[in-house]
Amino acid sequence: MQIVHIVPGSGGSFYCGNCLRDSEYIQGLKRAGVEVMKVPMYLPIFADKHDIEEVPVFYGAISLYLKHSFPALRKAPGWMEKILNSGPALRFAAGMAGSTNPKGLESMTISMLLGETGEQKKELEHLIDWLEKHCHADVIHLSNALLIGLARRIKERLDVKVVCTLQDEDVWVNAMDEHFKIQTWDLMKERARDVDAFFAVSNYFAKEMQPVLNIPDEKLFIHHITIDPAEYTYQNTSEKPLNIGYISRMCEDNGLEVLVDAFIILKKDSKWCDVKLIVTGGSTGENDKFVKSIKKKIKEAGLDSEVEFHKDFEDGRHEFFKKVSMTSVPVLHGEAFGLYLLESMASGVPVVQPALGAFPEIVKKSGGGTIYEPNSPEMLAKALLGLLENQEKLNQLSEEGRKGVEQKFNIHQEAKDVVARYSKLLNK
């Protein structure tokens, strides 16, 4: 059995939970004895050494955007394509504003969903030509439902099963203007018929997406995000300083300002003078103004020396987990899952999350954190204080979180379940 996993990349400019999730998933399948090929789209998956396969980046972000904006460039010579899709050019694009924002990219999103009839039909045929030449895939697995425009043509030419993961597509689509939002959801519902199975990353998100895409029960399955616990060094909170951590892209939607405001409230009590806030996750150009405003707020509160911005969020995130005793990523509207939850708990760091999205589901199943509501700085400060004042509870959550990841969110067991799912799909 060979699985080809088509994954949009972030280029390594910020902590991309979906990129990490997909890479972990692929490694888990390989350890289970499955032949897997990772095929990146738009940008490299990570900044450097993580992408070890010699596979080109398809639908290069720069050429894709320029061709969409300037139709005459669709006939650009091959040498120009190579320059635009080179590693240095794509890494530069990864840090530019707009790479994670649908504003201005609505019509391109719709065109991508149109697949073989969209503006990128040439790129689609190029991708399939490459797959046909270099692979003998049984299943093509799409990283998210914004890619389902590829499915129809892939199935026509390659005669394979197409599987699609459901993970946070609503964040992109619902940020669009109403006209584009309606058009995009309608098109996704139509194109969902071309997919043989959907894997939702949480029960919460399965319930959210099933009616939106009109997915039949027999095509929808729950496969939680999982990790390999062995890749994370467990250290109980009793051995760490009482610091608070944030690990995600530094932006307004992910709630960094909520956490900073909660930290300012906590620091008004001199009892917690030694507690620091450690922030990591990187950002894109579109977040620059927000990050500057956050740093200004921290400075005005007189907490410059109490907040550390940890720059290395790829390999260096393991060092980050050694510095903190709890993490919180108070995403304003919740998330389909949140890989940082598992990474934190596997490292012995309890999580403090709002009662939104899949957070209550994941915290309950793992036992490694606490939930608060509503998602305000005052309530977050209260939840954080509850752990700061109760070291025994904090230590207990640290132990339970690690066990929860090992037993309930372990990639080794999940890989076996997924392989069995693929096999059933192929035997239909």
Image (spheres, helix red, strand yellow):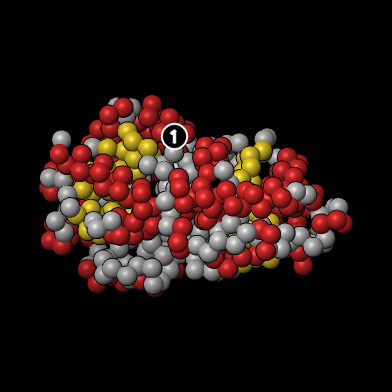
| Quarter in which the C terminus is drawn | top left
Residue in view at x 17 percent, y 52 percent? 1
**Towards the viewer: 334 or 390:** 390
Residue 281 in sight: no
* Percent position of residue 59, x then y: 30, 57
In the orientation shown, which residue stands out farthest toward the right?
270
**Towards the viewer: 47 or 29:** 29
How many numbered dots are placed on residues in this image? 1
Residue 397 in sight: yes
Residue in view at x 15 percent, y 62 percent? 134
Residue in view at x 51 percent, y 59 percent? 15
Residue in view at x 67 percent, y 35 percent? 373
Question: In this rendering, would 315 be left or right of 266?
Answer: left
Density class for disc 1 (Cα within 10 Å; few <14, some 14-19, many ≥20) is some
Q: Secondary structure at mark 1?
A: helix
User: On the image, numbered disc 1 is attached to which residue?
Assistant: 203
Question: In this rendering, would 410 be left or right of 327?
Answer: left
**Towards the viewer: 227 or 376:** 227
| Quarter of the rendering containing residue 235 | bottom right
Question: In this rendering, would 87 be left or right of 153?
Answer: right
Q: Amino acid at mark 1?
A: Asn
* Percent position of residue 358, x then y: 51, 38
Question: In this rendering, would 312 be left or right of 395?
Answer: left
**Towards the viewer: 425 or 7:** 425
* Percent position of residue 385, x then y: 76, 47
* Percent position of residue 342, x then y: 51, 51
